[in-house]
Amino acid sequence: MNIRPCNLLFFFWMVLCIPTLAQVTPLEQVNVFEAADTVTRVIPKTDTSPYPQSHGKFHSMAQDAAMQRGSGHTYAERVTHWVLKCDPILLSRGVLPVFLERRLSRFFSVEGAMGITFEDYFKEFFIQGRQLYDKDPNAVKMNGMSAKLAVRYFPKHEGLSGLYISPELDFTNYRKQEKGIYINSAGRFTQGALLDQQKYVDLLAVLGTQNTNEAEREVYLDWYVGLGMRAGYEDNVGNDESNSGVIRVTHSEKISPILVFGLKLGLGF
């Protein structure tokens, strides 16, 4: 039997390669090239996504792409940077603000609000004891203003959802006019109107939780409670005890503790 040199070289090549092939694990893909005498091993890469998974709320970019396939949304498009909100509970205090929250980083956001004020129904009915059918014929209603500023810290979750703590600074101004007879700066009785207004500055420590639907991150519910101090500056118009039928302005300033709570409804974009 004649053995060709090429066949002999092929036999020795197989003897050298078989032990190496036996050491390859099932996870490794082996590509043997006919034109070379080397073995190439390809080891699958592990997931190096920068988006960690946490209780099913955050996914890798590949998972998000799979979840959003068919809807036209990507991971970057689903990250909420702004939330526009309102607080219906504040209507009972005669305050109608519009809130806007801006995401600053993974754990921080800033929230501001501007709005108008009108009659404080809670104070009028529950504190001063006014009845629903009672109307002051001498009162001229006016609108005031309100403003809020807060910095929020989310310790457990990324984005604008989850438990948060926040220092908050609020300003509220109520205004109206009372018509009647009063004594002017010259000491004369004058028929006209006096400005009745209350200004409040609140410094609060707020604890809350902001929740959203996981799929689209569009609708937000923001429950909160806050405790702090209030500085009040009041110009209240009332009857002059020393002059019957005459009204006067009484100025007062005070600092007192305050407790606030509410629910904000928001839309993310």
Image (spheres, rainbow, N blue to C red):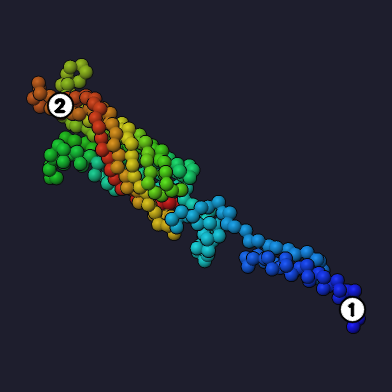
Q: Which amino acid lies under the numbered mark 2 shown in the image of this protein? A: Ile
Q: Residue furthest top?
A: 186
Left or right, 151 with reference to 238: right
Which residue position is annotated with label 1? 3
Please state the horizontal and vertical placement of residue 244, each as a whole percent of the image.
8, 25
Mark in front: 2 vs 1: 1
Pick the front one: 47 or 61: 47
Please state the horizontal and vertical placement of residue 167, each as a whole percent of the image.
37, 36
Q: Residue furthest left?
A: 244
Which residue position is annotated with label 2? 247
Question: Which tag, 2 or 1, sits closer to the chain's start?
Answer: 1
The numbered disc on residue 23 is none
Question: Given contact means CB atoms under 8 Å apart, are the residues at marks 2 and 1 in contact?
Answer: no
Left or right, 81 with reference to 93: right
Q: Secondary structure at mark 2?
A: strand
When asked about the image quadrant of residue 238, the answer is top left
Whether 139 is drawn above or below 262: the answer is: above
Q: Secondary structure at mark 1?
A: loop
Instruction: Give the alpha-carbon distance from disc 2 to disc 1, as whole Å.
Output: 128 Å
When asked about the image quadrant of residue 187, the answer is top left
* Residue found 13% across the figure and 40% down from its top: 130
Q: Which amino acid lies under the numbered mark 1 shown in the image of this protein? A: Ile
* Residue found 20% across the figure and 20% down from its top: 184
Instruction: Specify few, some or many for label 1: CA neighbours under 10 Å numbering under 14, 14-19, or 20 or more.
Output: few
Left or right, 12 with reference to 93: right
Please state the horizontal and vertical placement of residue 251, each as a whole percent of the image.
21, 24
Q: Residue furthest front?
A: 1
Pick the front one: 107 or 36: 36
The N terminus - image quarter: bottom right
